[in-house]
Image: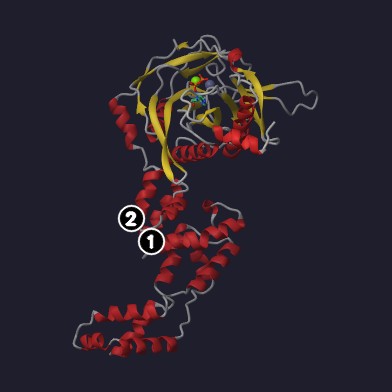
Amino acid sequence: MVTTTADSIAAHTKYEPVIGLEVHVQLLTATKIFCSCSTRFGAPPNSNVCPVCLGMPGALPVLNKKVVEFATLAAMALQCRINETSIFARKNYFYPDLPKGYQISQYDKPLAEFGFIEISAGKGKKKIGITRVHLEEDAGKSLHEGFPDSDEKTAIDLNRTGVPLIEIVSEPDIATPDEAYEYLTRLKEIILYTGVSDCNMEEGSLRCDANVSVRPRGQKEFGTKAEIKNVNSFRFIREALEYDIRRQIDVLESGGKIPQETRLYNSNEGKTYSMRSKEQAHDYRYFPEPDLLPLVVDETWKSEIARTLPELPEARRARLVKDYGITEYDAQVLTFSKSLADQFEEAAKAAKNPKRVANLVQGELMGRLKAKGIEIEQSPISMKGVAASADLVEGGRISGKMLKDLYDLAFERGKDFPVVYEEEGRPQQSTDTSALEKMIDDVLAANPKQLEQYRAGKTTMLGFFVGQVMKASKGQASPQIVNELLAKKLS
Ligand code: ADP
Ligand code: ZN
Ligand code: MG
């Protein structure tokens, strides 16, 4: 029972949660880890199989080189130390969708160790340790639904057996469900930047098991953990953790004990349920895989892989702030994906004023995307389009109001900015020159000394006057037109 009485709130501040996450990520290789079968998702059941991934007697695994490169790249992006030699191990258990009766994984000598992910926590930053990144093969898929004749049947699809996975195990450094959510968000972002996985949760390319315990605040030893399995969104993981933390505290407060167990989350009810006690299911009798040599990633290979490591999101954000004078927040939005960041940089480099490109993304694009319920990657206005519009405003060709109207049209028509700008016949802002002329006269009258210097041949004073007029117009005037009018007046 979850209660929210004053007593229970007091009890909850007495305890602190401890969370560690185990994340499985499917690598985007064309073929499986130990055979040449395709990894394509959605193929007809049991069509991507061969004697190796079906576990036929005598069939031998051959390690896919690309898998090692992808896994190593991911581990490097997670700041891990790559072990020169790692060992494949058999994890023995019986399950209908595991035809060999064991899974080839890594155990005491994993591919990589000692990494971390930096997350924001509260107002600051915090490093969450990564214990290990190891390679393993996926199991098949049991399908319990969709049989009209009986609901007691289970079908098995072995297309997924032997699909390459990395498992990323965190240290129990995560202190709240929000931190867990943030860790997963950063983890996914980093993996997406490396391009080794699409991290698609619906298709099972990213799966997370959450381990959680509670302990009295200040106590050093960890409490007994529950492992929550197979939760299929980051939001549900946060919810499942919130629920289970409250549940565990309530058990302890009422004098009970937390058993070590595996639990499942029911997202409709917002509750976790015991699936099995851990003791029952935990002797995997790991031993070194006799059919595979130790995996050696030597210095040469390592540095070849390191060369393909892209700039990572955190570093890129810092650089964008520095290079383009944009805010942290702008940088956050613009690095949402690697392709978006690439597009922005390409556009910003070509634009007269990169800061204006960032401002338009923030001020004009994001709101319209949100209203339409689409991601920036599906935006009708491309980053190049934003840059083109920024240049038009910068050059005084169109006003801010006109830009807004053109953006509205672009969204209405589902077309990019330059297309709509052409369709509308390259509109230009009509400028009220009489008001501007009055401002110019005022500026000249107010600065007789500078005017004298200008007349004496110091033509650089023109810039000063333009600046003053722009200021007087509160930035509304077109600098181009101000320039033209001033030149006329002064000649
Ligand atoms: P197991 O042997 O049950 O797989 P591990 O020690 O390998 O347990 O840890 C698995 C995951 O659980 C790791 O992410 C680790 O950080 C986390 N973890 C370990 N002990 C605890 C605990 N007491 N409370 C919360 N998380 C824990
Ligand atoms: Zn195969
Ligand atoms: Mg473990």
Please indicate whether residue 276 sits to the left or right of residue 222 in the image.
right
Which of the image's four quarters has the N terminus?
top right
Query: Dot 2, how many residues are within 10 Å of its Cα: few (below 14), some (14-19), or many (20+)?
Result: few
First reached walking from the N terminus: tag 2 or tag 1: 2
Q: Which mark is residue 312?
A: none
Quadrant for residue 144, please give it. Answer: top right
Q: Residue at x 29, y 86 (%)?
A: 447
Please indicate whether residue 275 sits to the left or right of residue 362 in the image.
right
Query: Dot 1, how many residues are within 10 Å of its Cα: few (below 14), some (14-19), or many (20+)?
Result: many
Give coordinates of residue 385: x percent, y percent: 47, 62
Which of the image's four quarters has the C terminus?
bottom left
Q: Which mark is residue 323?
A: 2
Q: How many marks?
A: 2
Q: Amino acid at mark 1?
A: Pro
Residue with the mark numbered 1: 354
| Residue situated in front as seen by the camera: 488 or 172 | 172
Q: CA distance from mark 2 to mark 1?
A: 9 Å
Give coordinates of residue 378: x percent, y percent: 54, 53
Please indicate whether residue 154 sits to the left or right of residue 475 in the image.
right
Q: Amino acid at mark 2?
A: Asp
Looking at the image, do the residues carrying marks 2 and 1 touch, with CB atoms under 8 Å apart?
yes
